[in-house]
Image (spheres, coloured by chain):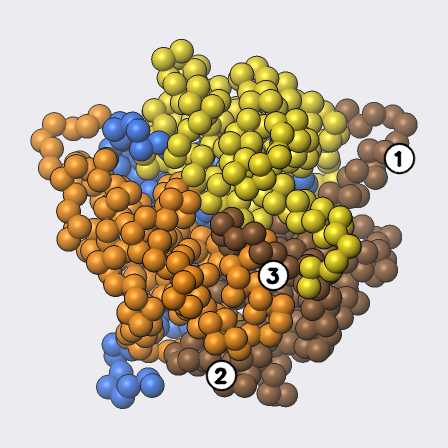
Chain colours: A orange, B brown, C blue, D yellow
Amino acid sequence: MSEQHSYSLNSKKVEAATDEWLARRGVTRDKIAELVHFLQKDYFPNLTVEECIHHVNAVLSKREVQNAVLTGIQLDLLAEEGKLLEPLQEMIFNDEGLYGCDEVLALSIVNVYGSIGFTNFGYIDKLKPGILKKLNDRSDGEIHTFLDDIVGAIAASAASRIAHRKQAERENNTNLPLD
Amino acid sequence: MSEQHSYSLNSKKVEAATDEWLARRGVTRDKIAELVHFLQKDYFPNLTVEECIHHVNAVLSKREVQNAVLTGIQLDLLAEEGKLLEPLQEMIFNDEGLYGCDEVLALSIVNVYGSIGFTNFGYIDKLKPGILKKLNDRSDGEIHTFLDDIVGAIAASAASRIAHRKQAERENNTNLPLD
Amino acid sequence: MSEQHSYSLNSKKVEAATDEWLARRGVTRDKIAELVHFLQKDYFPNLTVEECIHHVNAVLSKREVQNAVLTGIQLDLLAEEGKLLEPLQEMIFNDEGLYGCDEVLALSIVNVYGSIGFTNFGYIDKLKPGILKKLNDRSDGEIHTFLDDIVGAIAASAASRIAHRKQAERENNTNLPLD
Amino acid sequence: MSEQHSYSLNSKKVEAATDEWLARRGVTRDKIAELVHFLQKDYFPNLTVEECIHHVNAVLSKREVQNAVLTGIQLDLLAEEGKLLEPLQEMIFNDEGLYGCDEVLALSIVNVYGSIGFTNFGYIDKLKPGILKKLNDRSDGEIHTFLDDIVGAIAASAASRIAHRKQAERENNTNLPLD
C-alpha cells in the first residue's frame, strides 16, 4: 500500500466480494465454523457450531483478512486456468513443496488475532479435517493451493478469538474475583 | 505448499525466471545494491556498491525470496493489464491504502535474514530513494504495487546480511579477543 | 501458551500493570500519541493529538500488546540492574547490533493492526522522534532496548488504526457512493 | 537492536552459551533431532537421526536462533525462581492461555527457514512428542513455557532445511533434467 494515494475502495464492496468468491470456491461460513469447532470442542465442551459461525463472521469482517482471501483465490483461479507465467504456474498448480507464499498470506490472517493461533493453524493444516480435505482433493480439477491455507488460518483465528472472549466472559460472570 | 506432493521444480529454472522478470520490470541488481549502500554507508564508510551487489546476489539466491518476487511481479503485471477480478483489480492497480498483501510478501523476504532488517525496510519504504522512486512513479503506466515493497525488502535483507558478515570479519581479523 | 492449562489471569490486572509499568519507565499515552500525530499529520491535516490518544488507548487495550509491553519492560529492567545471565546481559544492556528479539516482540504488536503498519514502524524506529529519542539516550543510566521498539510499534499500530477508521468515516459520511 | 552502537559480542561466546543453556535445561541436539525425524520420516524414509542432527546444528548456528534460545530460557529460569514482576510472573509460570510471547519468539526462529515450516511447528506444538512432552510436564517443578515452543521451532526449521536440501540433492544427482 502507499499512503501517498488518497484512493480507497468502498469496504462493503470488498466484504461482499470476499463472501461471493468464497462461496464460488465451495467454502461456506458453516464449513469454516466446523473447523473451529473441531479445534476448540475439547477446551469448551458447550461450544456450538452456531457460536463458532459468529466468530468466523468477526474474522471475515476484517479488511486484512478479506485482502488475503481475494488475493489467494485470484491466484488459485489463474493457476486453474493455466494463465500464470512459468515457472509460477507450475509451482502454484502443483502446490509445490518449496513454494511458501500461500503460508505467508495465511499467517497474515492468523497474526491479526495474535500468536496464540499459530499452533492451531499448523495443526489443522497438517490434519486437513472437513472442508480442508475437500480443498486438497485435486481429483476434481480445482486448484486450492492458497485457499486451503487461508481457510485453515481463518479457522485458527476464530479459535483464538474464542479463547479471548471466553476469558472475558469468565471474568464478567463471576462475583468472586479471579485473583 | 503441501508435503503430500513429491512434485518439485528445478531450482535453476526458478532462479533464472527471477532474474529475467526483475530485468523486464526495470530492476537490476545494481539498482538494488545502490539502495543497500544508501542504507549502510553511514555505518560502514568503506562499503562499496560492488560489495553490496555480492550481498544482493546472496539474498536473491534464496528460494523463499524468488517465490515472493515471482508472485509479486505476476500480480503487478495482471493489474497493469486489467486482468484481475474486481475489486482486487482496483485495489492493486491503485496501490490502495488498506491493501497490505504487498507488505506481507515483502516481510517474508525480510524475515529470512532476521528481525534486524525490519527498521531498514520501513525506512526505505517511506523515503523511496533511487529505483524505489521510479517504481512508484505511475506516470509511465506501469504498476509496481508489489515490486516496490519487494525491492525494498531485498535491500533491507542485504543490509542485515552485511551487518552479520561485518561482525564475523571483525572477529576473525583481530588478534585480541573482543571479550 | 498452552491450552492444556485452564489457569488464566484477570484481564484488568494485566491492563493496569501495563499502564503502571509504562508510566514508571517515563512513557505516557500522550507521548505515544505525539508519535502517532507525527506519523499521520501529513495524511490527515485535521488530526488532533487528542484523537491520537483515543487510538493509542485502543491499541493498549489489546492483551497481545500488553503481554509484549510487560515482557519487554521486564527484560529492560533486569538488564539495567545487571541481573540477566551473560552473554544476554551484555547484549540487551548494550542494545547489541545483532540482537533482534526486541524487534520481534515489537512486530507482534504491529501485526495486530495488519501489515500496513510495518512502514511506519521502521520509519519511526530510524528517525527516533519525541519520546523515542529520550528512550535511546543512555546518559541517564536507563536501559530501554525493548521499550524503545515497543513504543514505536504501538504508535505505528495506532496509525494503522487511524487509516482504517478514517476510511470507514469517509464511507459513512458521504451520500454519494464512493464507487 | 540499534545500529548507533558499535558494540558487539563475540559470536563464539553466544554460540557456546546457547549450547550450555540448552544442556542445563535438559535439551540435547539428539533430542531435537528426534523431533525432526518424527516430522520428516514419512516424506524421506531413508532419513536418519544422525542426518537430522546435522540440520539441527545448522539451525543452531544462526545468531537469530541463539538470541531467541537465550532470551526464552532466561525468562523461564526467572519464572521458575519467582523473580519476575507480577502479573508477568504468574502468566509465564502458569503458561497462561492468552500469553503468546513464547510463540512470537518461536516464530522468529521458524521464519529464518521460511514459511514452509509453520505447519510443522504448529503440528508438533500440539502433539508434543518426545522431549516436548517432558518439557511440558510440570511435575518436576521446572518451567519451560518458552523453551517448549522454541525447541519445537528449531525442529520445524531443521525440517524445512531438509526439504530444501533434499530438493537440491535430487537436482544434482540426476542426469536427466527434471524439467
Q: Nearer the viewer, mark 3 or mark 1?
A: 3
Residue drawn at the location 88% of the way across and 31% of the way down: B174
Percent position of residue C123, x then y: 57, 58
Label placed on residue A154 = none
Mark 1, other Cα within 10 Å: few <14 / some 14–19 / many ≥20: few
**Letter of the chain that mark 2 sits on in the rendering:** B
The relative height of residue B46 versus residue B90 in the rendered view (above or below) is above
Q: Nearer the viewer, mark 2 or mark 1?
A: 2
User: Where is mark 2, residue-wise?
Assistant: B83
The relative height of residue A16 versus residue A27 in the rendered view (above or below) is below
Residue drawn at the location 87% of the way across and 52% of the way down: B46
Percent position of residue D8, x then y: 73, 35
Q: CA distance from mark 2 to mark 3?
A: 21 Å
Percent position of residue C66, x then y: 37, 41
Identity of the amino acid at label 2? Lys
Left or right of D143 on screen, residue C100: right
Q: Mark 3 or mark 1: name the one nearer the start of the chain.
A: 3
Identity of the amino acid at label 1? Asn
Percent position of residue A81, x then y: 48, 76
The relative height of residue B144 versus residue D166 in the rendered view (above or below) is below
Label placed on residue B173 = 1
Residue drawn at the location 76% of the way across and 70% of the way down: B28
Q: CA distance from mark 3 to mark 1?
A: 36 Å
Residue D45 in which image quadrant: top right
**Letter of the chain that mark 1 sits on in the rendering:** B
Furthest residue toward front: D176
Identity of the amino acid at label 3? Asn
The answer to whether any part of residue B126 appears in the image is no
User: Where is mark 3, residue-wise?
Assistant: B67
At mark 3, the secondary structure is: helix
